[in-house]
């Protein structure tokens, strides 16, 4: 039906008339032209203007297995024909949900053997925060309510997720639930490099401990952190950071929640970011690559101490969603994990990530505006700075990043700009040739940005 009428419809106009987009300034959007994506294949997207675009972001960090995987479509179709929906409330389950829970328990780091399903990363985070509160209530410590997060952290867009994250704009727009505080992120490059990376990792972790001492460990439920901060600009902590956070959480009896909505299922070159960074979490939130984004699904992996409390002591947990354990979503996730395992995408992410960074260094190290290239597995960032030697950022943060992002779009490459940090996270199936294409397009875009910046921006 859509195909038949597509040539007759002004999709841009219709979109502007009725569609409110997420994280969008609509006035600015309507002044320009919305892009209509019509198809996808492998690492490429197609738009209604006939462009073939290299998706350097895997959608929103999620399309691990690439677009147009027939196997995932077949898994959904088969399950839809058999049982399109039933809930997992009221002493009921379904086979795909059981099989997926077992498989995730097997894949998870040691000690996490239970799974709670929801539909989005935000809901998984909300569930984790709720479980943390109920855990402490059950343990006779109801005053343990505060959750510590980090500036630039992103934990989703429900009111609790926005409050747990460290995005000031989101806090301002009603993301201000009580009992959330933030400390500094382990952003070594942004901190200016006065300390060695290892020293800075300890220093950033110490801010968590100082906050605990300030507020009292008896008032704190949990620390929540992404293994690396994705939406905040792919902030990769120094190696010293997470072991110290493990120690601090254990010593002060605080639950540790690793938000792996971006890092889960291979992105960093291990199945979980917790494996890559040596994190020992009580709970892990996952979503995105669990189904490669083909269908909404999230899974909260729950560690034994918390799970045992819920199973043996809590009684009823008054929480859940209509689509928790949705059979079609779980069937797609199982097929997606088959692809990830069969094609060795996790180890491949590690290998291809090294290759990608090597090529980026070759192409960009001489550019005076490139302050740092960093990454782990197939996720990374390029810092654009006003002065390379002193790591000085541009005065008006975000302008140059946006400029560069627009050049990328013009060159048929999707990258995200976070402030003036260009971030990338391509599908894990990206080939060496496609990496060459990505590097060529990003190098060209940065060169074009530099030429424009020289003319227009006061350094
Ligand atoms: N936690 C983390 C670490 C995330 O990255 C969420 C939770 C929330 O997931 P849902 O499925 O509720 O969106 C995320 C999502 C961006 C961008 O522009 C990042 C996300 C979502 C949308 C945009 O970088 N991350």
Image: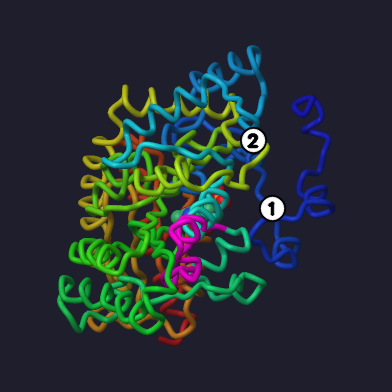
Q: Residue at x 47, y 73 (%)?
A: 400
| Quadrant in which the N terminus is drawn | top right
Q: Position of residue 47 (x, y in %)?
A: 62, 40
Q: Residues within 10 Å of mark 1 (few under 14, many from 20)?
A: few
* Residue 138 on the magenta segment: yes
Left or right of 228, for residue 278: left
Q: Where is residue 431 in the image (x, y as percent from the top left)?
A: 32, 34
As measured in the structure, the alpha-carbon distance from the residue carrying label 1 to the one carrying label 2 is 31 Å
Q: Which residue position holds label 1?
A: 34
Q: Please, what secondary structure does the residue beneath circle 1 have?
A: loop
Q: Please, what secondary structure does the residue beneath circle 2 have?
A: loop
Q: Which residue is drawn at 37% across and 54% down?
A: 258
Q: Which of marks 1 and 2 is nearer the N terminus?
A: 1
**Quarter holding residue 5:** top right
Please say whether residue 408 is visible from this viewpoint. Answer: no
Q: Residue at x 58, y 21 (%)?
A: 76
**Quarter holding residue 103:** top left
Q: Where is residue 134 in the image (x, y as percent from the top left)?
A: 51, 56
Q: How crowded is mark 2: few (under 14 residues within 10 Å), some or many (20 or more)?
A: some
Left or right of 4, for residue 267: left
* Residue 66 on the magenta segment: no
Q: Which residue position holds label 2?
A: 323
Give the residues in magenta.
134-156
Eyeballing the image, is 135 above or below 179? above
Using the image as rendered, state which of residue 254 and residue 239 is in the foreground. Answer: 254
């Amino acid at each position: 039906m859509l195909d038949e009428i597509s040539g007759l419809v002004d999709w841009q106009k219709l979109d502007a008339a009725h569609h409110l987009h997420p994280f969008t300034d609509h006035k600015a959007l309507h002044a320009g032209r919305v892009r209509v994506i019509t198809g996808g294949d492998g690492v490429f997207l197609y738009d209604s203007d006939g462009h073939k675009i290299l998706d350097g972001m895997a959608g929103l960090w999620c399309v691990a297995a690439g677009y147009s995987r027939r196997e995932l479509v077949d898994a959904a179709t088969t399950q839809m024909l058999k049982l399109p929906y039933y809930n997992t409330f009221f002493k009921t389950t379904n086979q795909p949900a059981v099989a997926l829970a077992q498989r995730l328990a097997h894949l998870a780091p040691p000690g996490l053997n239970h799974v709670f399903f929801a539909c989005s990363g935000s809901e998984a985070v909300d569930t984790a925060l709720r479980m943390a509160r109920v855990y402490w209530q059950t343990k006779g410590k109801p005053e343990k309510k505060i959750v510590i997060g980090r500036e630039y952290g992103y934990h989703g867009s429900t009111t609790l997720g926005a409050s747990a994250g460290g995005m000031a704009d989101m806090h301002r727009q009603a993301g201000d639930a009580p009992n959330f505080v933030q400390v500094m992120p382990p952003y070594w490059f942004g901190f200016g490099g006065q300390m060695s990376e290892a020293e800075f990792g300890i220093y950033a972790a110490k801010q968590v401990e100082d906050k605990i001492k300030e507020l009292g460990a008896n008032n704190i439920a949990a620390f929540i952190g992404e293994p690396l901060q994705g939406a905040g600009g792919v902030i990769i902590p120094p190696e010293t950071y997470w072991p110290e956070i493990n120690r601090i959480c254990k010593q002060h009896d605080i639950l540790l929640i690793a938000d792996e909505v971006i890092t889960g299922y291979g992105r960093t070159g291990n199945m979980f970011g917790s494996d890559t960074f040596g994190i020992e979490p009580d709970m892990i939130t996952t979503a995105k690559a669990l189904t490669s984004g083909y269908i909404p699904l999230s899974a909260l992996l729950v560690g034994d101490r918390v799970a045992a409390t819920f199973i043996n002591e809590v009684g009823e947990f008054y929480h859940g969603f209509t689509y928790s354990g949705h059979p079609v979503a779980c069937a797609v996730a199982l097929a997606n994990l088959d692809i990830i395992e069969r094609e060795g995408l996790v180890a491949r992410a590690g290998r291809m990530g090294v290759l990608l960074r090597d090529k980026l260094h070759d192409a960009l190290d001489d550019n005076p505006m490139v302050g740092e290239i960093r990454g782990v597995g197939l996720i990374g960032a390029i810092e654009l700075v006003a002065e390379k030697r002193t790591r000085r950022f541009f005065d008006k943060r975000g302008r140059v990043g946006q400029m560069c992002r627009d050049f990328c779009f013009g060159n048929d490459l999707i990258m995200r700009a976070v402030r003036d940090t260009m971030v990338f996270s391509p599908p894990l199936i990206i080939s060496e040739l496609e990496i060459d294409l990505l590097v060529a397009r990003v190098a060209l875009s940065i060169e074009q940005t530099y030429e424009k910046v020289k003319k227009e921006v006061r350094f």
